[in-house]
Image (cartoon, coloured by chain):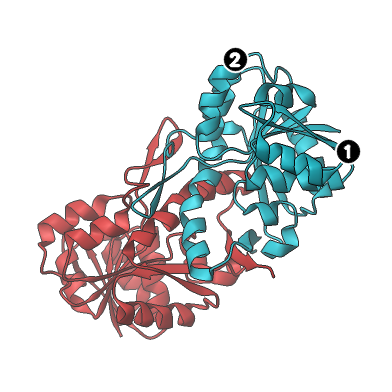
Chain colours: A red, B cyan
C-alpha cells in the first residue's frame, strides 16, 4: 500500500520506518519538500521511502497518517485546503497536548476533540483516530507496551476496517471500535493519566487493557 | 472501623452494604437525618448500619466516602463548613458528570478536577480520590470487572496507605498511587471512554488494567 506520513518527528519516523519494513511505499511530508529530517529518514529507510510536502504526502497514498504535535495539523490543514485527502483514509494519531509550567493540559477537550476538528478541517477525508493512547514505540510493537487494547473511532466503517487490518499487521490483537469520530474525546483525554503514569514508571512502555468480568 | 457514607444512592448503598458485611460500622448521611432511602438501607443492612445527616456521617468515623452524583458534594461541603472532616480521611469516589442531550461531559476538567475542589472545600480533610474509574458493583468486587487496576491519589501519604489497606479487603490487587490530588484529573477524565465502553458493552462490568512491556 502507499502511505503518506504527515510530520517528520519521532512518531512519523517510527511509523514510516515500520511501514517500509512491512513492504509499503511511504512518503514523508513536511512544510517544505526538502526537509532535512525527512531527507535523513529517506536515506536510512531505503528505496520504498520518499519525501515531499504535506500535500504531496497526503495525496500520495490511499492512507495518510497525521503525526504532528498537538493541534498543529489544524493550521496545516488550512494551507492544504479542504479537498486534499478527498476520499482518502486519514489516520490521526496525535493528541492536542499543551505544556505550561511543566503541567500538561489539552487545548481541545471534553465537548470537542482534535479528531473531530481534523474531520471538520478536511470534510472529504475519512478520518480515523487511533494509536494515540500509546507511545510510538508501542504503536509499532504492542508487546513492548504489554499488549494493551487499541481503540479506534471514525465516521466511515470501511475506513475503520482498512485501518484495523493495518493495525493487525503491526501486532495489535485487541482492537475496539468505539464508534464515530466524537469518541476521540475519550481517547484524547486519556493523555492525562498516560502522562501521569509515564512520570511514575519513567518509561513509555505501557498501555491500557480493557478487561471484562462476568 | 467506623465509616461514614455521604449519599444514599446506588454507590453509597453498595459500598455501605459491603463495609457492613466486612464487619465495619457504617453511618449513611444525607441532607436530612431521617432520609427514607437511608432508613430502608439501615433496616436491611443490620445492626452495624445507622443513618444521620451528612455532618453526622462525616463526623462518625475515621473515614468518610463521598458518594454523591456529579459536583453535588461541593454544595454540600459549603453547608458543612470547612472544619467538618478535620484530620479525617475523605474518600472521593464521585465524578463531575453532566448530561445534556444524551451527551456526557465533565463540569470540571483538564486544568482542574472534582478531587481538587473537594480538597479545597474541606482543607482540613485528607482527601483521597479512588474507585471512580469503575461501576459500584466492580468497586466492591473487582473480579466482576475483570480485575482491573485501581488508581488512587491524594496529598496525604498516611491517608492513602489507610485507603489502600481498605481497598485490598475489597479484593483490589493492582493499586497504583498516582501522586497528589491533582492526579484526579487523569482518572476523572477517563469517564469519557468509560461511558463510551459502557454503551458498547451494554453492562458496566469492565475496567482498565495498566499493562507494561519490556
Pointer 1 chain: B
Q: Quadrant of residue A162?
A: bottom left
Whether label 2 touches label 1, CB < 8 Å:
no
Q: Quadrant of residue A180?
A: bottom left
User: Closer to the N terminus: mark 2 or mark 1?
Assistant: 1
Q: Quadrant of residue A121?
A: bottom left
Pointer 2 chain: B
Residue situated in front as seen by the camera: A186 or A99? A186
Write the residue at 28% across / 58% down: A116
* Residue A140 rendering spot, x and y as whole percentages: 48, 71
Question: Is residue A118 visible in this depiction of the protein?
Answer: yes
Say left or right for A199 vs B138: left
Would you place residue B204 above or below residue B2 in this image? below
* Residue B56 rendering spot, x and y as whole percentages: 72, 22
* Residue A152 rendering spot, x and y as whole percentages: 41, 69
- Label 1: element kind: loop
* Residue B90 rendering spot, x and y as whole percentages: 68, 29
Few, some or many residues within 10 Å of mark 2 (<14, 14–19, 20+): few
Residue situated in front as seen by the camera: A212 or B214? A212
Residue situated in front as seen by the camera: A25 or B211? B211
Q: Quadrant of the C terminus of chain A?
A: bottom right
Foreground tag (2 vs 1) = 1
Which residue carries the number 1 mark?
A: B47
Say left or right for A29 vs B102: left
Write the residue at 63% across / 41% down: B93
Few, some or many residues within 10 Å of mark 1 (<14, 14–19, 20+): few
Same subunit: marks 2 and 1: yes
The numbered mark at residue A59 is none
Question: Is residue B149 visible in this depiction of the protein?
Answer: no
Would you place residue A133 above or below residue B188 in this image? below
Q: Quadrant of the N terminus of chain A?
A: bottom left
Which residue carries the number 2 mark?
A: B81
Amino acid at each position: 500500500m502507499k502511505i503518506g506520513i504527515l510530520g517528520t518527528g519521532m512518531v512519523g519516523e517510527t511509523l514510516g520506518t515500520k511501514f517500509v519494513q512491512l513492504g509499503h511505499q511511504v512518503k514523508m511530508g513536511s512544510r517544505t519538500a526538502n526537509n532535512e529530517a525527512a531527507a535523513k529518514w529517506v536515506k536510512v529507510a531505503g528505496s520504498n521511502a520518499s519525501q515531499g510536502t504535506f500535500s504531496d504526502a497526503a495525496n500520495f497514498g490511499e492512507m495518510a497518517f497525521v503525526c504532528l504535535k498537538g493541534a498543529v495539523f489544524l493550521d496545516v490543514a488550512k494551507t492544504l485546503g479542504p479537498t486534499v485527502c478527498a476520499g482518502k483514509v486519514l489516520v490521526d494519531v496525535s493528541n492536542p497536548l499543551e505544556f505550561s509550567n511543566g503541567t500538561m493540559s489539552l487545548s481541545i477537550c471534553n465537548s470537542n476533540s482534535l479528531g473531530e476538528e481534523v474531520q471538520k478541517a478536511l470534510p472529504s477525508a475519512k478520518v480515523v483516530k487511533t494509536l494515540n493512547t500509546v507511545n510510538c514505540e508501542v504503536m509499532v510493537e504492542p508487546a513492548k507496551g504489554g499488549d494493551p487494547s487499541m481503540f479506534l473511532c471514525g465516521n466511515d466503517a470501511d475506513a475503520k476496517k482498512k485501518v484495523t487490518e493495518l493495525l493487525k499487521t503491526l501486532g495489535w490483537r485487541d482492537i475496539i471500535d468505539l464508534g464515530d469520530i466524537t469518541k476521540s474525546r475519550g481517547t484524547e483525554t486519556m493523555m492525562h493519566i498516560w502522562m501521569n503514569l509515564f512520570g511514575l514508571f519513567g518509561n513509555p512502555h505501557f498501555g491500557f487493557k480493557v478487561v471484562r468480568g462476568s
